[in-house]
Image: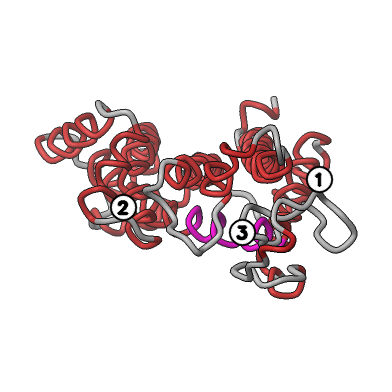
Amino acid sequence: MESLKEVFMGLLKDRVGRLGMIGVLIIIIMALLSPYIANHDVTEMNAKIKLSPPNSEYFFGTDEFGRDVFSRIVYGARVSLWVGLISVGISATSGLILGLVAGYYEGKIGTVIMSIMDMLFAFPSILLALFIVAVLGPSLTNTMIAIGIVNTPVFTRTVRASVISVKSMEYITSARSIGLRDIQIILKHILPNILAPFTVQATLALSGAILTEASMSFLGLGIQPPDPSWGSMLSESRKYMELAPWLAIAPSAFIIITILSFNIMGDSLRDVLDPKFKL
């Protein structure tokens, strides 16, 4: 896998990738600095200013409880990124381990693992996530666990396909011939050579995890009030679409920008890391 500097420079050379990086960077900065960017308490209610349009003090207006929409959007970025990173971390770690085992030991072990993954794939991802949260109970932790489980089959398939391709190479045969153990071959020779597609998949999975969280919160089974979530904010705005359209525009715009930025950066990262695009 290329060095981080080479990957970063490759992304900078790509005009579209550069745009995606800027979008992701803005969202990350907004999430990290949310206590300093938000100019009001996200739970502070003021009936006197409820449904106020955007103005110099309340940049995105106020909601039906008189809460500052801008501050809730800013803190919602932290929630979305946190859910995305943790859930993708869960699915990426489990998918990497299962994919390595299923790809290297293709026999009965691989068949059992991939059969389980196929069973999970049989369910629409959002329905499976909703079912898991309904069983475990709606909360931030359970939302991350549900999204992590739902995304595990994607990583497992990606890693397994890469392992099967790499383990047929001559240097793997040479490693076996000199007596290296399976764990040494996997960690030293196979793992470093499958990180490129794995990294791209992780980047793209982040946007999917954020969208799934927003969808679950929209349906009331994700992040629970009073914690701000773009999905729940969008759900609450349905009653006031004509009276206060800014309530729906703000969270919708940030959901679209965040997902689009991660997808663009993921596509550009694939082009940088995949040798076929350099021919």
Q: Residue at x 70, y 29 (%)?
A: 278
Mark 3 Cα within 10 Å, few/some/many (few <14, many 20+)?
some
Gap in Å between the C-alphas at discs 1 and 3?
43 Å
The foreground one among 127 and 123 is: 127
Secondary structure beneath dot 2 equals helix
Question: Magenta stretch: dominant SS?
Answer: helix
Residue 81 falls within the magenta-colored stretch: yes
Residue 196 falls within the magenta-colored stretch: no
Residue designated by label 3:
65
Gap in Å between the C-alphas at discs 2 and 3?
42 Å
Q: Quadrant of the C terminus?
A: top right
Residue 272 seen: no
Residue designated by label 2:
94
Q: Is residue 181 left or right of residue 38?
A: left
Name the residue furthest right: 56
Place of residue 15 in the rendered image (x, y in percent of width and height, measured from the top left): 83, 35
Place of residue 44 in the rendered image (x, y in percent of width and height, measured from the top left): 63, 71
Highlighted range, magenta? 71-85
Residue designated by label 1:
12
Task: Mark 1 or mark 3: name the one nearer the start of the chain.
Answer: 1
